[in-house]
Image: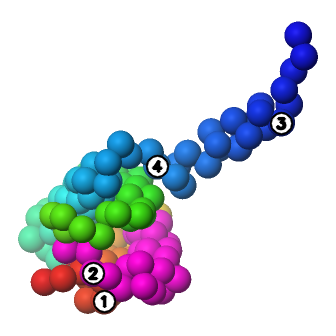
């Protein structure tokens, strides 16, 4: 059988790029997906915040687990801001698409800060967690201020 290497290469390329081009049947599905990922992320980020701010007792194991979840979830929403997802049940501002490079930069910054938070959460002491939590929260807020409606 004659192999179609061109087609095979194209399929492999598509498979490898799946995370960056998440598949959604409808724009509304993408909106739901990104909101869900932000919601779950915020729940776990909040638990880290409670420990960092002394509202909850410090628990090294819980900190490490919550930070892992935040770091993983923090990678997800960005692929769900595709075409047609600027409408409907969303607080996303038009600037996300008009200033796409700036939005990308802000989302990269947030991911870098939560990666640092994840490392800090695994140091096993509350001071490391406290030091990394502030900059991570600031990176969330920077995006809300510029790219999210109130
Ligand atoms: C949270 C949360 C956010 C960020 C942001 C930081 O706990 O849910 O979205 O922190 O409020 O300013």
Dominant secondary-structure state across the stretch colored magenta:
helix
Ligand 1 within 8 Å of disc 4? The answer is no
Does residue 98 belong to the magenta stretch?
Answer: yes
Could you tell me if the residues under marks 2 and 1 are in contact, i.e. CB atoms within 8 Å? yes
Q: Quadrant of residue 6?
A: top right
Residue that carries the numbered disc 4 in the rendered image: 22
Residue that carries the numbered disc 2 in the rendered image: 93
Q: Which stretch is magenta?
A: 91-117
Task: Single out the mark in the foreground, 3 or 1.
Answer: 3
* Residue at image point 38% right, 46% down: 24
Task: Single out the mark in the foreground, 2 or 3.
Answer: 3
The x, y position of residue 26, in whole percent, is: 32, 48
Residue lying farthest top? 1
Q: Nearer the viewer, residue 86 or 91?
A: 86
* Residue at image point 41% right, 69% down: 114
Disc 4 or 2, which lies upstream in sequence?
4
Task: Single out the mark in the foreground, 4 or 1.
Answer: 4
The x, y position of residue 53, in whole percent, is: 17, 77
Q: Residues within 10 Å of mark 4 (few under 14, many from 20)?
A: some
Disc 3 or 1, which lies upstream in sequence?
3
Disc 4 or 1, which lies upstream in sequence?
4
Disc 2 or 3, which lies upstream in sequence?
3
Identify the image quadrant of the N terminus: top right
Q: Which mark is residue 6?
A: 3
Q: Which mark is residue 146?
A: 1
* Residue at image point 9% right, 71% down: 55
The x, y position of residue 46, in whole percent, is: 18, 66
94 vs 27: above or below: below
């Amino acid at each position: 059988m004659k192999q179609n290497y061109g087609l095979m290469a194209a399929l492999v390329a598509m498979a490898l790029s799946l995370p960056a081009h998440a598949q959604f049947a409808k724009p509304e599905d993408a909106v739901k997906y990104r909101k869900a990922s932000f919601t779950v992320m915020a729940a776990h980020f909040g638990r880290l915040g409670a420990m960092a701010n002394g509202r909850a007792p410090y628990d090294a194991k819980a900190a490490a687990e919550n930070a892992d979840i935040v770091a993983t979830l923090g990678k997800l929403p960005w692929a769900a801001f595709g075409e047609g997802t600027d409408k409907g049940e969303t607080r996303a501002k038009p600037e996300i698409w008009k200033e796409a490079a700036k939005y990308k930069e802000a989302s990269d910054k947030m991911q870098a800060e939560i990666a640092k938070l994840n490392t800090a959460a695994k140091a096993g002491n509350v001071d490391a967690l406290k030091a990394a939590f502030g900059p991570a929260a600031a990176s969330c807020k920077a995006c809300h201020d510029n790219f999210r409606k109130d």
